[in-house]
Amino acid sequence: MHATPSADRRTAAPAAPAATTLAALAAAQFAVTLSTSIVNVALPAVRDGVGLSDAGMSWVVNAYGLAFGALLLLGGRAADLLGRRRVLTAGLALFAVAAVAAGLAVAPWMLVTARTAQGVGAAAIAPAALSLVMRLHPPGPARARALGVWGAVSGAGGAAGVLLGGILTEGPGWPWVFHASGIGAAAVLAATVRLVPADPKEAAGPRSRLDVAGSLTVTSGLVALVYGLTAAGRSGWTDPLVLGSFGAAAVLLALFVRVERRHPAPLLPSRLLSSGAVGPANLVMALLGAVWVGLFFFLPLYQQQVLGAGPLEAGLSQLPLAAANVLGSGLAPVLARRIGPHRTLLAGLAAQAAGFLWLARIPADGTFLAHLLGPVLLVGAGLGVAFVQLTGSAVSGVEPADAGLAGGLVNTTRQIGGAVGLAVLGTLAAARTHAASDLPHTAALTEGYRGAFLLSAAVLGVAASLTPLLARRARPVRETVPATHPSPAAASCPSSRIR
């Protein structure tokens, strides 16, 4: 890029970036969340296309989610040390190539490997993009609006993935589920190079060593944990392989803690979790991620396996969910100014819990309009509100040098919460379905899905009970707010504090 005076000014004073710059960064986040759910509707076709087993189908989802979630902290630290735009563009390039490779897979190992590489790319994209949004938007109304957009595309990406997956599976075929992701990522990469300002010289922190040992131990430990939870649903909790997986997970995660205490530049420094509301906000985000991923997994299965909907019909039914999510994300900053961020977060969690309780009453002979539309609108709106509030809390009050790491952490907790939550919910659903095996097959499946939705409502209740801790730990951001923005507006911004 040419170092023109205008470019220098844009880098030096990024307080009011062009809307297109925010759009490029939001598109990067949309790409990674879309790829979490775009394969859900296509899984039966993917299974037949590459010869996957039933267990292999779950790993098409989990390979991406685990690599994404477990490596986000490393991606966030790399963004802080090496430059945020540099890490973002590298992640987009890897993501695009891996997605195309997944569409070309002809064997299960090829597909799972490509999905893992795609998750590695996503782990670089998400924290770098979020930290750039925080750098380009100072505290106050501008950051609140930017986080509203961020929350909208993050939630809508999950619903849009199911919709696009259905369209592509019934149209050109399942490989295009992956090819479309690759083409989209390539377009976002071009937009990022053109629109996102380069990192200032001082943006890259001191050249500390990346904590590779910590990254390897936490990734291996999480893979062992999720594998054990997934296998328990098929083999039982006392199976030697299941117990061995849990034992390996305990050892590896304990080793991760030991590595972090000794490393000069740990992947997860203790100071980060003690900054403002970062710790409790991430805990609540993990619980939110558990029900979020479960919703986009079980809802299409219920529609296809119980109600008899095709992939396209199941995908189109996600449009109301996406619209409600966008509406909730846009309303979050407005609600925060009027009733306070703490009450806004509680309202978002309560709306979702009510929606999941409603879903826990679905019948085996239900219809979309009578039994799904209402709860889907509640869950979508509540998800948008809660996501914006939690994201703001999880990345505010940290030192600028840790901005990328904080962005990586909040995405990590959401993804890991989703992977662990999906394994637990799937195990529960399978157990309830098995217990109801004397019923007709669709009724037995419905019992399993109802149990998963009921547990999701309970998880959201636990999340709501933790919000007072968030309020006590929150504190205003110690950054200079332009004189044109009155302090009450900055104080009510969801990124500045939770009351």
Image (tube, rainbow, N blue to C red):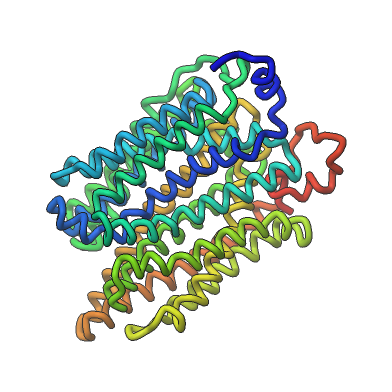
Residue 473 in view: no
Q: Residue at x 63, y 36 (%)?
A: 134
Q: Residue at x 29, y 42 (%)?
A: 115
Is 276 situated above or below 432? above
Query: Which quadrant holds residue 258?
Result: top left
Q: Residue at x 21, y 59 (%)?
A: 45
**Residue pushed farthest front?**
172
Location of residue 425 in the rendering, given as x and y in whole percent from the top left corner: 36, 64
Residue 308 in view: yes
Give the left or right position of residue 42, taking residue 382 as reference. Answer: left
Residue toward you, 300 or 439: 300
Q: Residue at x 65, y 56 (%)?
A: 330
Location of residue 455 in the rendering, given as x and y in whole percent from the top left corner: 43, 69
Q: How many marks?
A: 0
Is 53 situated above or below 256? below
Location of residue 393 in the rendering, given as x and y in whole percent from the top left corner: 64, 46
